[in-house]
């Protein structure tokens, strides 16, 4: 019972966007396809891929890491993620999103403020 009350208290004290999945994605180019990684608040990590712009997204479960979700969410909050400005898209475009916020940049190096979270999420392995 105590654990339920603590969890409920944390959920109510945490902004809604911080309880949303975090997704790192890169795609575009000739095919419009791409791939990425998503982590949900319970720590479920899923590899996402799409061969072409119109093809269905394929989701492959990778594992569980609740501590990573908390760490990455805290890092995004610390840099003011919801207030960072996107760059114009490129032929290949990468994004980092959480809740209703999506940060976009042309393929290549992510903005310094989110580079660590982006690299860790995309490179997560069980």
Image: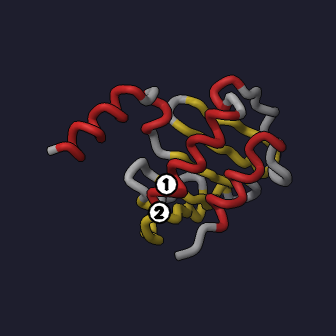
Task: Confirm whether residue 96 shows in the render.
Answer: yes
Q: Secondary structure at mark 2?
A: loop
Q: Quadrant of residue 122?
A: bottom right
| Depth check, front residue: 58 or 83 | 83
Q: Secondary structure at mark 1?
A: strand
Q: Position of residue 121 (x, y in %)?
A: 62, 58
Q: Which residue is mark 1?
A: 39
| Depth check, front residue: 122 or 88 | 122
Q: Position of residue 71 (x, y in %)?
A: 58, 50
- First in sequence: mark 1 or mark 2? 1
Q: Position of residue 61 (x, y in %)?
A: 42, 69
* Tag 1 near tag 2, CB within 8 Å: yes
For the view shown, which residue lies furthest in the front direction?
2
Q: Residues within 10 Å of mark 2 (few under 14, many from 20)?
A: some
Q: Which residue is mark 2?
A: 65
Q: Is residue 94 above or below residue 58?
A: above
Q: Is residue 109 above or below residue 7?
A: below
Q: How is the image coloured?
A: secondary structure
Q: Tell me what residue is drawn at x 52 percent, y 76 percent.
A: 126
Asked if residue 41 lies left or right of residue 116, the reply is left
| Depth check, front residue: 68 or 90 | 68
Q: Residues within 10 Å of mark 1 (few under 14, many from 20)?
A: many
For the view shown, which residue lies furthest in the bottom direction?
126
Task: Confirm whether residue 56 shows in the render.
Answer: no
Q: Quadrant of residue 14?
A: top left
Asked if residue 69 lies left or right of residue 85, the reply is left
For the view shown, which residue lies furthest in the left direction?
1
């Amino acid at each position: 019972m105590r654990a339920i009350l603590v969890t409920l208290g944390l959920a109510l004290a945490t902004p809604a966007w911080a309880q949303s999945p975090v997704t790192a994605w890169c795609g575009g180019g000739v095919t419009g396809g791409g791939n990425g990684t998503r982590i949900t608040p319970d720590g479920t990590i899923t590899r996402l891929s799409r061969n072409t712009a119109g093809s269905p997204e394929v989701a492959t479960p990778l594992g569980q890491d609740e501590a990573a979700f908390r760490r990455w969410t805290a890092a995004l909050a610390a840099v003011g993620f919801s207030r960072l400005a996107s760059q114009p898209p490129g032929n290949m475009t990468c994004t980092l999103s959480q809740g209703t916020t999506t940060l976009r940049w042309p393929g290549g190096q992510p903005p310094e403020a989110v580079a660590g979270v982006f690299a860790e999420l995309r490179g997560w392995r069980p």
